[in-house]
Amino acid sequence: MKPSKSLIEKTWVVFVLFITSCANITEEIYLNADGSGKYMVYTDAIESTRSMMMGMMSSIYPDASEDSLRQVVEAQIWEQFPLEVDSIIDFSSRVPDSIKNDPDKRKYLDKMEMFMKGGKQDGYINSGMRFSFSSVDELQAFNDFLSENQGASGDAMKMDLPQMKVQYTFDGSSFARTSKINADVKMTDSTMMVIGSLIEESKTILILHLPRKAKKVSKDQLVGKVGKDVTYEFELIKVFMGTQSSDIKVEF
């Protein structure tokens, strides 16, 4: 299915929103025995739009009940999105020439896909990005690329925020992720208030699909371990403020 221009625009808006808004974010890492695999990060565009619309409606109609506002929102929400979609989105026009014309950066774009998948019957539309990597080192380099260029595609992503430095390690029988906030950036009180209001109730979910059954896993923030699949859940505001660790390690 070839997406329409309006769908591309909506997908880009959702992509920006899920980085900077109240949307829950899901990361999935499919890891093969040789260290290759696939990385995905996405949000449910319906969930994030519903949350945003509910917030707007409640501020406009403070005396209205939550149930009545929800009925209005549910009636309107599918007017903004397709009833069913499974598309790869070409977002190259949104990428500046400084990235497209740099071979060291372009190589990541060539292996990166923006997608939108789901519909009304599913109850969700997942919108995000996926990247196939040949080694965990390449996954690391891709993550560094995203961090270094997160402000390159729009003003909404250019807030002066502390950066999260993520480090992946893999030795054939274990996989680990550590993260550290760069505290050098000092945010103003107004920025703190804006960020807090955007991500106060947001969560990040990390799902690992391992090459073999998990034998031993770190317990902090663990919400599920079934066979080869391990799931962690973190409160985004606590991770951002450095009061909750998002470090994990699994052995298989």
Image: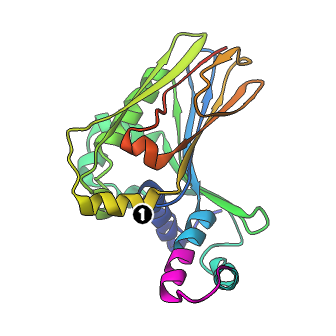
Q: Residue at x 77, y 61 (%)?
A: 122
Identify whether 244 is placed above or below 176.
below
| Image location (x, y in percent) of residue 21 | 45, 61
Number of residue marks: 1
Question: In what element is the residue under mark 1?
Answer: helix
What are the residue bounds of the magenta stretch?
A: 53-66
Q: Quadrant of the C terminus?
A: top right
Nearest to the observer: residue 43 or residue 30? 43
Tell me if residue 86 is in the magenta stretch. no
Magenta stretch mostly in which secondary structure? helix
Q: Is residue 248 above or below residue 25?
A: above
Could you tell me which quadrant the N terminus lies in? bottom right
Q: Is residue 43 toward the left or the right of residue 72 in the image? A: left
Q: Nearer the viewer, residue 153 or 91?
A: 153
**Where residue 199 sits: x, y (%)?**
46, 57
Q: Which of 171 and 225 lies nearest the eye of the viewer?
A: 225
Q: Which of the 4 quarters of the picture holds residue 103?
A: top left
Asked if one can make out residue 2 in the rendered structure from this viewpoint, the answer is: no
Q: Amino acid at mark 1?
A: Ser
Whether residue 84 appears in this view of the structure is yes
Say if the magenta span includes residue 55.
Answer: yes
- Which residue: 51% across, 69% down? 10
The residue sitting at 48% across, 25% down in the picture is: 177
